Amino acid sequence: MAPRRKRQKLSEEGGEQVTAVAEEPTLSHSKNDAAASKDAKQHKRQLFVRQLPRQTTTEDLTQHFSQSLPVKHAVVVTDATTKECKGYGFVSFADAEDAQRALDEFHGSLLHGSKIRVELAEARQRTDDGTPGQKPASAAKERREAAAGEQQAPKLIVRNLPWTIDSPDKLTLLFRSYGKIKHCVVPKNAKGTMMGFAIVVMRGRKNAEKAMEGINGKAIEGRTLAVDWAVDKDTWQSGQKDEVVKEEAERLEMEATREDNGTQADDEDGHVYPSGDNTRASEDEDDDEQDEEVLSEDSNDEEQEEQTTKPRTTTNESTLFIRNLPFTCTDEELKEHFEGFGAVRYARIVLDHGTERPRGTGFVCFYKVEDADGCLQEAPRAAIRAPPGKGKKDMADNFSHTVLQNELGDPSGKFTLNGRVLIVTRAVEKGEASRLTAEGVAHRNVRDKDKRRLYLLNEGTIASNTPLYEKLSPSEIAMREASAKQRKALIESNPSLHISLVRLSVRNIPRTITSKDLKALAREAVVGFATDVKEGKRERLSKEELARGGDEMKEAERLRKVKGKGIVSQATIVFEGREGTKVQEGAGRSRGYGFIEYATHRSALMGLRWLNGHSLGYQAVETDKKGKRPSKEDLQERKKRLIVEFAIENAQVVTRRNELQVKSRERPKAPADGEKDTEKSTKPGGSKTKSSAGPKKRKAGEKDATSDEPENPTAAEKLANRTRIIARKRNARRENRKK
């Protein structure tokens, strides 16, 4: 019976050998039960893989099981001499369900042409006759190591020592009552200062246990002592490395948790970085493997080195950030597209948290850093630029087909997905991405200060300490605040947007106001601003405000005076039909907003400041039935105050609109003088027709259309002319009804 009890103690010691080398095998039943339950839960998530080929590596095993499920940890047991696989290994997953799915899927699968066997790992109970797979030589070596550990004198490490215990003699007085003390060591640094801990070597493990139980947690001079079993230097250094790895993993886990609130790379951090629990689980797995398989010391050292260096390979070096993705692209399509550059670990499309729709960006993670580097090197780098030596007009002609990409930017076609040229960059951490985004927005604001005119974004805002702000209703205040946030987000999200110098956006307009009324109001606003300045009610425009626009505004003012046109170029109210779609004016109901375009920025600024917050003094349209009170909607219409801001425009849209205006002006001048003579129709006898005899007399005040309209109007122009005539007649009938 005595030998059997000795083997039982050795088995118990093996369970604690990694964490405490010098500890005797005496343990309580409660600790054994807790360790057994922990091992049972751990082995439900761990698979034992057999019949592995000799050339199999840990990376091959990880890649094989990562095809369908995320692998927490995988290791191939290798021979200490040949460095080749011994034919078996372990794979751990995050939960038991993933482990069971992997067991059902990969049992009997092929790896390097060999069929592997997969089963759940089990804690092996060592008996007299041994367990299957246990080697007598390994068991004998374990017994020799355990015997050597028993022969070593127990060492205790005492931490958080007070500065008064600065010599071995003083430390001996503290431990002498618990048994014989061989020697004590109080380490000091080169300057002679204590390092805060000491080593005590006692005779007999029982005495050391009594000392640890009696002194651990004892307070001396305000310091609580911590006593534990000491370990050798190699084990302590290995534990320090594991602690550094665990802290780094916990830091990365916190970053991944913060990333779940924003964006772009939830899936990336979840796969690239191991969490702190994963690291601790990996350590437990290594300990279990040492106890269960009784590997050699060299093999254990190799596994610890692999585990220590693993976080250095799980960085963003193999992860790429993809932009300009089609909004219909899926994870499977993205992964399939980039598998041509190498084995892809995962591919994820970034979704917008508000709309749960793709944002046009994504992440691709390769197994090998070399594949990611190769993909990044082949990615197109050139931006969309006009060829050298060409002007803006030529550039617009060259890129008239698309405003999203350069069709010649990817001649190989490797980075084109559904007609879009992908933009590939190296992925960064969440904190770095947020910093780069903030810097980009700030730099863009400074860079585009003159081009995008962001200084006009706050024009139209009413300060809360002004008398006009007190006159606003709560709904109008909320509307203005929401508009300010929306405009700011819109202008920052799209670099193609800019603020117009001459075009105003007018909202909260009473629904009975027409475009004609709005244009008259725009003219009245400029006159009203000048009157207020003359009376001292308003400040005049500053020199900086008058100089905005430069030569462009000066030329616009000169042309306006030459052509004899007014200060208001255009005023439009947006109408909608019964289905909610936009319709021509008079064909539906007003949406309550519109646009005013002035000839110059000076007039636009004057009109905005006079119209913004202006109440029209509008009277609701009376109903046919006399004596009927106005409806609630009519009363609300009377209280409306205009919300006027500079309109946000798209640079490409403005360019196309200007080109169309230039072409429409040049079209009537295209026919030559000789062609005009031949177009005049004559009768067979040579006499001219009635229409060619001369210009038809028109009514007084009627405008001659021959100077502004083409002689041969197109179908679209005819339709537009017909629509204008119908709208004019409807307005005339409406005016007659009011009278």
Image: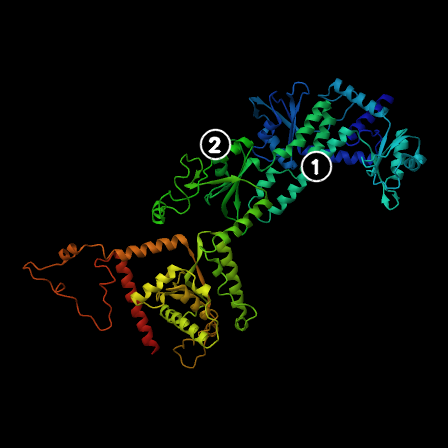
Residue 231 is tagged as none
- Identify the image quadrant of residue 152: top right
Residue 302, position in %: x, y? 68, 26
Residue 329: percent from the left, percent from the top? 47, 42
Badge 2: few (under 14), some or many (20 or more) residues near its Cα, within 10 Å? few
| Foreground pick, 625 / 209 | 209
Point out residue 702 in the picture as x, y percentages from the top left corner. 24, 70
Give coordinates of residue 442: x percent, y percent: 53, 52
Whether residue 675 is visible: yes
Image quadrant holding the C terminus, namely bottom left
Q: Residue furthest bottom?
A: 627
Secondary structure of the residue carrying tag 2 is helix
Image-based side of 152 in relation to 325, left or right? right
Quarter of the figure that contains the N terminus = top right
In the rendered structure, which amino acid carries the disc numbered 2? Gly
Tell me the quarter of the picture where residue 41 sits. Answer: top right
Left or right: 238 in relation to 618: right
The answer to whether residue 617 of the structure is visible from this angle is: no
**Residue 340: numbered disc:** 2
Residue at the spot of label 1: 244
